[in-house]
Image (tube, grey):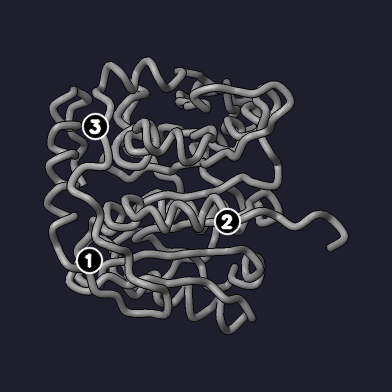
């Protein structure tokens, strides 16, 4: 999963990839309805320079351990196109894949953050989008992505995941966020991160949308009551589809009712058909934590 240079050229390639993906028929395995074919162009995706302006650059400091100097982490935050006083808005946390690691605080805006900055998405779903960046050679979750078998969840998060949590808490303090509508999603390495963070903070999120990742099946009881929609391509050779299958099976065995779309003939890029389907986004933003006591 190589990281492309953070220039406007990869946004052009991204738009072309979306066009090609939209032209392919999609079949699924599982109980969730297959994503619909997306239109050729929803609206023009922002350029790298436009994204740099739309997403505010922020940093947060995290101490890796006691008596260790804090490390500074970069992240980006997109706000609603306009904010109405007294109104609270949903927040989506996006965890990127391995190819977008680095320290430029820009590469992580590929895919979901780019598409959520399109005018149509901002009109349909006014929200905040939090996009942290994992450092080079680090991981959201310290696991081997190529293994079919799961890895037991570590008692403590990685330092980069601690930075995600710190960025989340800082955002909740500074912005008008609706605490009942905080959503978590990620792809590939970020799919692993989504499963991991949901299990660590199950009461924080209103819904989770993990894509082509995997988790520890032993954590299923912690997240069984969360609305979850998982996507994975059955031809994925980077992260084996068994990683999602076993998580879904564990959730159902624990009494949960997750949605699962396994995309027939699709390789590692199961995120484009997932994120580009308006019904998937509509489902995500429709989720809301029940009021306490209900």
Name the residue furthest right: 293
Distance between the alpha carbons at the discs numbered 3 and 2: 28 Å
Residue 110, horizontal then vertical, whole percent: 29, 36
Specify the label residue 207 is tagged with: 2
Q: Secondary structure at mark 1?
A: loop
Specify whether residue 136 is in view. Answer: no
- Assign a secondary structure to mark 3: loop
Q: Residue at x 17, y 71 (%)?
A: 265
Q: Which residue is mark 1?
A: 236
- Disc 3 versus disc 1: distance between alpha carbons? 29 Å
Residue at the location (26% across, 67% down)? Answer: 233
Q: Quadrant of residue 42?
A: top left
Q: State which tag comes first along the sequence, 3 or 1.
A: 3
Q: Earlier in the sequence, mark 1 or mark 2?
A: 2
Give the labeled residue for mark 3: 44
Q: Residues within 10 Å of mark 3 (few under 14, many from 20)?
A: few
Q: Compute the Cα span from label 1 to label 2.
A: 24 Å
Q: Is residue 148 above or below residue 284?
A: below
Residue under the point 30% across and 41% down: 111
Q: Position of residue 118 (x, y in %)?
A: 34, 33
Towards the viewer: 166 or 142? 166
On screen, residue 223 above or below 43: below
């Amino acid at each position: 999963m190589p990281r492309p240079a953070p220039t406007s050229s990869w946004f052009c390639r991204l738009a072309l990839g979306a066009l090609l993906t939209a032209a392919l028929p999609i079949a699924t395995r599982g109980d969730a309805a297959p994503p619909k074919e997306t239109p050729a162009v929803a609206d023009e995706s922002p350029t790298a320079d436009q994204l740099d302006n739309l997403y505010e650059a922020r940093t947060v400091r995290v101490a890796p351990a006691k008596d260790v100097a804090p490390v500074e982490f970069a992240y980006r935050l997109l706000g609603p196109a306009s904010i109405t006083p007294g109104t609270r808005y949903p927040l989506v946390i996006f965890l990127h894949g391995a190819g977008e690691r680095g320290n430029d605080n820009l590469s992580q805006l590929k895919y979901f953050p780019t598409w959520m900055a399109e005018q149509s998405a901002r009109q349909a779903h006014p929200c905040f989008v939090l996009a942290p960046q994992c450092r080079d050679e680090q991981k959201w979750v310290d696991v081997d992505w190529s293994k079919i078998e799961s890895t037991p969840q570590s008692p403590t998060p990685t330092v980069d995941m601690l930075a995600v949590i710190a960025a989340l808490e800082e955002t909740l303090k500074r912005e008008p966020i609706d605490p009942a509508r905080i959503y978590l999603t990620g792809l590939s390495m970020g799919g692993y991160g989504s499963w991991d963070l949901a299990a660590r903070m199950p009461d924080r999120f209103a819904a989770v949308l993990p894509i082509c990742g995997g988790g520890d099946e032993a954590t299923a009881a912690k997240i069984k009551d969360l609305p979850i929609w998982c996507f994975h391509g059955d031809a994925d050779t980077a992260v084996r589809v068994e990683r999602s299958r076993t998580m879904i099976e564990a959730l159902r065995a624990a009494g949960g009712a997750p949605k699962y779309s396994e995309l027939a003939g699709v390789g590692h890029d199961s995120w484009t058909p997932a994120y580009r389907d308006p019904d998937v986004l509509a489902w995500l933003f429709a989720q809301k934590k029940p009021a306490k006591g209900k």
